[in-house]
Image: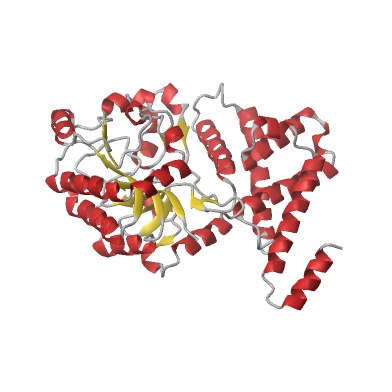
Amino acid sequence: MRHYADCIGFELTRRCNLHCKWCSKGDAQNMDMTKEIIDKTLDELSDYWIDVVRLTGGEPSLVPELVKYVIDGIIKRRIIVGTVQFITNGTITSDIIKKSSMKFLDYSNTIQDEREELAVFFDNEKRNTLYESLKGKYPSWITQISTWEHDNEKTFDIVKKFYDIQNEKYNLITQEELGTREDIGSIVIEGNAEKIYDQYSENQLNLIRILHNKFCIIEDGDGDKPYLKKTLSVSANGKVYVGSCMSFNHIESNYLFNIMDCNNDFWKKVDRWCWENPISSYANKLMERYKGIKWKYEHHIDRKLNNKDTLEAFEKLKNMIEVYRENLILFHPKLPYLSHTELNLFVVAYLCQELYKTAYEDNEENRNVLSMFIDYTTGLHKDELNHWNKQTSENMMNMMINRNNERAIEKIDNPIKKFFAHLYANM
């Protein structure tokens, strides 16, 4: 079965030639990714269809030979990649990187049919609305440079002109589209930003984000075309972690596994980690929101909007998410043939049934909390949420139990045993 990945990041170096005070990665480190780590990563992902490969650091322009090595490795293995995203601080130009981008543009022409399939699979038309220049496009290469807190005003125009390649499958995203720091939305409290948060404006602090990133990153539905729905990054020392904003220091204690420990089992290792961290991506957003409110309350920020009552309300939801997580782990061995998505729906329905038995929803406050819980664990649309009730929960549980049992029966090799198992299941 083919696997898909939304985004794979390569942290090519932890070195940087600047010292940006807001940098979520923290203080630079004297560490570059080895070619062995690159080879191992590409070998493990050689059969994957990857929408975006992201080249970051530190400052990746400091290691142009590694940029070239990644691109050459992708082409050599004929890995299906939709877009390469190269992120730079706009202080260094490199002929090696420029030639590599042009080489990948040529390669993308040879896998155009596959790229079009990827574009449909990941709904790129919908996703590419963030930047004006990407609307209606699916570029093979994106170079992204900015001036956010960077001392690069003297070099920015030079770098921009140097990387302005005239090709219909190439995009250069610069400060004009990125906007100012006031426009960027949520600010991750990681690395240097964690140390100097008091230098942010009040408006900026209202948009802070505290990373949680301990959730099921596999989207598998009924098991058809499963994919990695969140960025997975490989650090300069080979540690695989969720997202791309985590600080160098936090990566060391919040990683899934080391890529060098893989033995053609990348998906299995990710899958195992997901069963240990099984909450949905929607529940993860709730946990991050709770952590953000708690952080602001503890740091005496915006007490008026984030008062104790608000914190206590989210504390209830957080506690429900923890119970939900415990039950996902508990039921997985009991219903081993359900996918992540299916088991998630079963557990939500099960917990709702348990609450319905206690008349939990008899008062309005509890009804609202329960509705938010279902919303934050399933991601259902508002209309679907409005029709969720005791019968819905019961039907969902029965459907998932039957689905698990049917798959268990299909695993039986002995035809006589399979016959009686079918007979028993339908009694």
Name the quadrant containing residue 178: top left
Location of residue 422 with respect to 60 vertically, above or below: below
Which residue is depicted at the point 80% across and 47% down? 394
* Residue 107 placement, left or right of 82: left
Location of residue 266 with respect to 412 vertically, above or below: above
Residue 87 position in % (x across, y down) = 28, 41
Which residue is depicted at the point 42% across and 68% down? 264
Identify which residue, 19 or 345, lies in the foreground.
345
Identify which residue, 177 or 363, lies in the foreground.
177
Residue 180 position in % (x across, y down) = 32, 24
Residue 235 position in % (x across, y down) = 34, 54
Location of residue 414 with respect to 125 vertically, above or below: below
Identify which residue, 419 or 57, lies in the foreground.
419
Residue 13 position in % (x across, y down) = 26, 51
Which residue is depicted at the point 59% across and 53% down? 278
Q: What colour scheme does the image use?
A: secondary structure
**Which quadrant does the C terminus fall into?**
bottom right
Identify which residue, 316 or 106, lies in the foreground.
106
Which residue is depicted at the point 69% across and 61% down? 335
Name the quadrant containing residue 139: top left
* Residue 9 placement, left or right of 97: right
* Residue 347 placement, left or right of 56: right
